[in-house]
Amino acid sequence: MTTLFAVIVILSWLWLGLSALPAGLEARMPMPYMIALTPFLWIPLVITAGVAAWQHEWGGMCLLLASAVMTSSQRISYWGTGLTSGTKRETPRETDLADRGTTCETLPNQFAVMTLNCRYGRANAESIVAAVRERHIAVLALQEVSDELVARLDAAGIADLLPYRQSGEPQDTDNGGYNVLFSRYEPAAAVPNVVEIPAADVPAMTLKLTDEAASTDTPQHSRTITFCSAHPKSPMRGCADWSAGILGLGAVAKASAIGDHNIAVVMGDLNSSTDHPSFRALLKSGFKDASLTQAAGPNLTFPRWVKWPRIELDHILFTPGLKPSGVRSFEVKDTDHLALTATLTLR
């Protein structure tokens, strides 16, 4: 039995080692899925530790319990201070986010955002509109959208609450549908695709901040926040494209239009969690994760139809300058993901 316990411990450490690979090297099947299941390894490990205790294998029991704690290390970070993202900015690619006018509405210094994967456009439009109304959402990011869903959203009155929108261009590389942004405030700029990744277009809207929220040390340039709706491919649609899509979103944080005083917010089903090296590399490119930063526990979003076990796939990311609060997930009818919402406050 001692040998069996030793083999189980070694296998668990090898499994854990997948999360420590350099970003991109985990982009081979079935590693993305194995990494996603890492937080649940504690279950068989604790059971095996119980067997070891029954067999009076105290050394094996301790190693198995230590391994069980290690499998939950990333989730434990949601209750602590979280990961620290770098703030250095580079400009590998110019993005068209410049102001296209001088008259537009402005964001207040505190506002609510929401993101939802709409499951091939099947999500219940009335439920989405009701959530926007009840939660006072200022910017809504949707993924896996169809023309039929947009028509149902219009019929449900989405334009009365969020009159401005920008969608990506439907194309063959879409994974389940295209991405859309809705806004309560008129954007100063909007583009259908702000960054090239091997997945659906990443539409973006740039909104100006109110004068009192704007930086006083940059009087000639009011601060802006650029919002993006993103959906990298799932590993089953191509592991290489999956990792490249996640890593490619880092260009948004590094864009010259964001610079040192403007802010970028990326929302969507990113098909990854903090256990994945590619996602942690995205955070290090300049983003912070709202749920991780809030440090009040993870917000698990998939699958909707079971309370447990769930994994975290949907995220609200932002560059320095915002403070998240009220981050939580909740159900929307007829989709497989939970929606994710947060209140963002200018720091």
Image (spheres, rainbow, N blue to C red):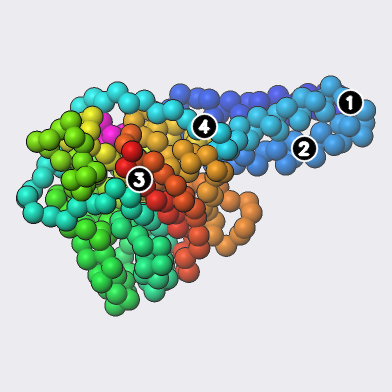
- Examine the structure image and report whether residue 9 is included in the region drawn in magenta: no
Which region is colored magenta?
250-255
Residue at 75% in and 36% down: 45
Question: In what element is the residue under mark 1?
Answer: loop
Q: Name, please, the residue furthest toward the bottom.
A: 155
User: On the image, numbered disc 1 is attached to which residue?
Assistant: 57
Mark 3 to mark 2 CA distance (whole Å): 41 Å
Residue under numbered circle 2: 46
- The answer to whether residue 309 is visible is yes
> CA–CA distance between discs 4 and 2?
27 Å
- Residue 345, labelled with which disc? 3
Chain-order first, disc 3 or disc 4: 4
First in sequence: mark 2 vs mark 1: 2
- Write the residue at 39% across / 51% down: 343
Task: Tell me what residue is drawn at x 35 percent, y 45 percent.
Answer: 345
Q: Dot 4: within a 10 Å radius of its alpha carbon, few (fewer than 14), some, or many (20 or more) residues? A: few
